[in-house]
Amino acid sequence: MLDSLLTPSTSSHMQTSATTFDHKDFLNHIFASAPWPSVDETHAPQPPPSDVFVDSRNQQIMMMPLSSHHQNDNVDGSSAHALYSGFSATGSRPFHIPQGSGGGPMHQQGQTQRQPQQQASASTDTGGTAVSPSQSRTKVRARRGQATDPHSIAERLRRERIAERMKALQELVPNGNKTDKASMLDEIIDYVKFLQLQVKVLSMSRLGGAAYVSSQSSEAGGSHGSASSAVAGGNQPTGNSNDGLTMTEHQVAKLMEEDMGSAMQYLQGKGLCLMPISLATAISTATSHTRNSLIPGAGDVGGRPSSSNLSGKTVQTMNTLKLNSNGNCMAEGSSSIAVKEAVSISKP
Amino acid sequence: MASANKPINTDVPEKDVFALHFLQSLSNLRRQNTFNSPEKTNDRVKKIKKVAYVSMARAAGGTNRLWSRALLRRAAKENNKVVRFPRRKKRVTCLRRRRSNRRDPVEEEEAERLRNLVPGGGGMEISKLMEETAHYIKCLSMQVKVMQCLVDGLAPK
């Protein structure tokens, strides 16, 4: 099984027998094929045909250079070093000497070899110096200056995995150029909240309701990402909303006479809110100049979707829509219930 | 920390799959009698939102992903339906993390927030959680794109 593992597809002919081992040869192969991380990059995205690879584990090994390529600054030299010191210690080696581009998978196999060995010999391993099990696997020898403690190795592996995943997430989230892990996590969390809010708002607009609902959703959604819909939606609100709002106003007034709850529900369904006049005027004066920047700002694809910003904007658009049509804003004491609807981002 | 370092698979189906699932569930929703009443828009909103999430979970891989399983399970519980999921091959075992589990307090707090957002994130540890988050983000953005296209297509000019 080891043989099949160690046969890269590019050099299937390089099967030397496992009797003697020459350090120098091995090192020459590894360091002569110097740019093997980049070589692997061409291979990794498209795994070679699997006629040589026997099982899926091989493909994983072949794919690994892509993921570890990001970490090649701290992984390459150290693991090559680790392999070397490991071989020098035991003097036995089960590896075949692969060719140049196989040097990448070669050292990766060293790493993946470490883990199953760790699993198997977890109970018998006494800090990496115990006699290797009868299966003649390589002895794990961490790099110099590091503990050979299996826990710290596991620790390191775990950190590497987390870093790897963090990189993948960084590409997904816009504005993911933060190097700090904590702020990156903040960005991720905000982005997830933002996407969930978008789904919620879009599902409100699916009612095929008034135009201002859909324009509002396109504005809210357009503050990040989809520029076209934002620009298109940005032109709508002033035209349609005025008529729609007067009608809504009458409707709500009628409903309020019967039952406050249904009036609230109606408003919520329209995506509007009720707020005290003082708050409304404060918001409108504060944002009358920023509202103009909403629409051209929405055209910018790299907008930052912080949740507080977004909910603030949604409140603004709703509010300014309300205020534009009628000077006397509908206000009822201290009821600002539906503001929560926009601001709170609840679990779906 | 005994599992092998497999590359992460965060592939997500094309937009068509998502669109198909969503439209199917929307048409199912329309057939319900209680749906098309003009009042109670709030309920309609909630139903549509739930349908959006469920169709997204189905499109994204059904029960193969932790978050979609959790989502579907939660949705079914609301409907009081009994769901049966096929047993997965490997279970998430916390037993394997021995003392090598370093709890970084800052990290853990953020991870807690993430766990609250991503469905099914309660029992996972950080690396798995991040993998699920990546897939979840991809699916969410795909779903948003689909819904946005629908809205744009149907909006009055």
Image (cartoon, coloured by chain):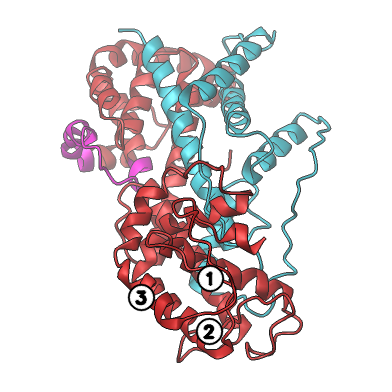
Chain colours: A red, B cyan
**Dot 1 alpha-carbon crowd within 10 angstroms: few under 14, some 14 to 19, many 20 or more:** some
Please, which chain is the residue tagged with disc 3 on?
A
Q: In the structure shown, which secondary structural element does the residue marked by tag 1 occupy?
A: helix
Q: Is residue A314 above or below residue A270?
A: below
Tag nearer the camera, 3 or 2: 3
- Mark 1 or mark 2: which comes first in sequence? 2
**What's the magenta region?**
A285-312
Mark 2 residue crowding within 10 angstroms, few (<14) / some (14–19) / many (20+):
some
SS at circle 2: helix
Q: Position of residue B71 (x, y in %)?
A: 66, 39
Q: Of the residues shown, which amino acid type is indicated by label 3?
A: Asn
Residue that mark 1 sits on: A110
Indicate whether residue A118 is drawn in magenta.
no
Q: Which mark is residue A28?
A: 3
Circle 2 residue: A86
Q: In which quarter of the image is residue B78?
A: top right
Chain letter of disc 2 in the image: A
